Amino acid sequence: MSTFVGVKLKSDSQKAYWFSVPEELSPDIRMGCDVICTTVRGTMDGQVVKILDGISEADAAKIIPARLFPLKGIIAVARQYELKDVYVPMELEMEAVNPETIAGRVQEFYDTGRFQKVIIKAGGQLIDGYDAFLVAKMFGHDSITGWTLAE
């Protein structure tokens, strides 16, 4: 059984296009979550507006109009991670973090209320965004929003 999601792409907010969801990202899919999808035009950001879970591909093809049926797939899902559950590899911990980069991340958080480009594997391993992780810890945050990548 598979999961399919209807996504309103940021480039075309009128229609919901359907995408297949990799099994490792299925637990993170929920209504309204942000996702990154692969399309014939490249990767695009969007928001989940419909979910078909536990359905076979043949049954999904009967329900979803053919012109909207799966363009490609979901490659990343935004979700909240508890900082204590994020594993930071030794390579990232050993890197020297530039003070200007930290200052930029602090300003980014003050301006937007979140950090951009925090990438975490489905198992919880931090891939990119160690500077944002450090700033979140520095300010006493319990969690951080990151993009979960399909492996």
Image: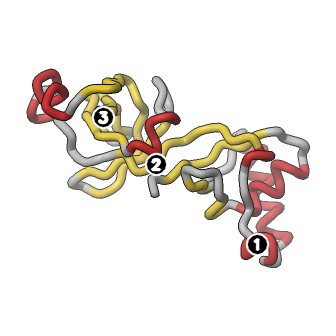
- Is there a contact, CB below 8 Å, between mark 2 and mark 1? no
Judge the density around disc 1: few (<14), some (14-19), many (≥20) Cα neighbours within 10 Å: few
- Residue type pointed to by label 2: Ala
Q: Quadrant of residue 11?
A: top left
Of the residues under marks 3 and 2, which one precedes in the sequence? 3
Task: Tell me the residue at 29%/57% (across/down).
Answer: 42
Which residue sits furthest front? Answer: 1
Q: Position of residue 43 (x, y in %)?
A: 35, 54
Q: Which residue is mark 3?
A: 2
What label sits on residue 135 in the rendered view? Answer: none
> Alpha-carbon distance for marks 3 and 2?
16 Å
Image quadrant occupied by the N terminus: top left
Left or right side of 39 for 47: right
- Is there a contact, CB below 8 Å, between mark 3 and mark 2? no
Q: Quadrant of residue 60?
A: top left
Task: Tell me the residue at 24%/55% (across/down).
Answer: 41
Q: Quadrant of residue 2?
A: top left
Task: Tell me the residue at 50%/34% (across/down).
Answer: 27
> Alpha-carbon distance for marks 2 and 1?
24 Å
- Residue type pointed to by label 1: Met
> Alpha-carbon distance for marks 1 and 3?
35 Å
Tag 1's secondary structure? helix
Q: Which residue is mark 1?
A: 90
Q: Which residue is mark 2?
A: 76
Left or right side of 148 for 108: right
- Residue type pointed to by label 3: Ser
Query: Relative to 16, is 97 above or below?
Result: below
Q: Position of residue 58 (x, y in %)?
A: 13, 31
Query: Relative to 83, is 1 above or below?
Result: above
Between tags 2 and 1, which lies in front?
Answer: 1
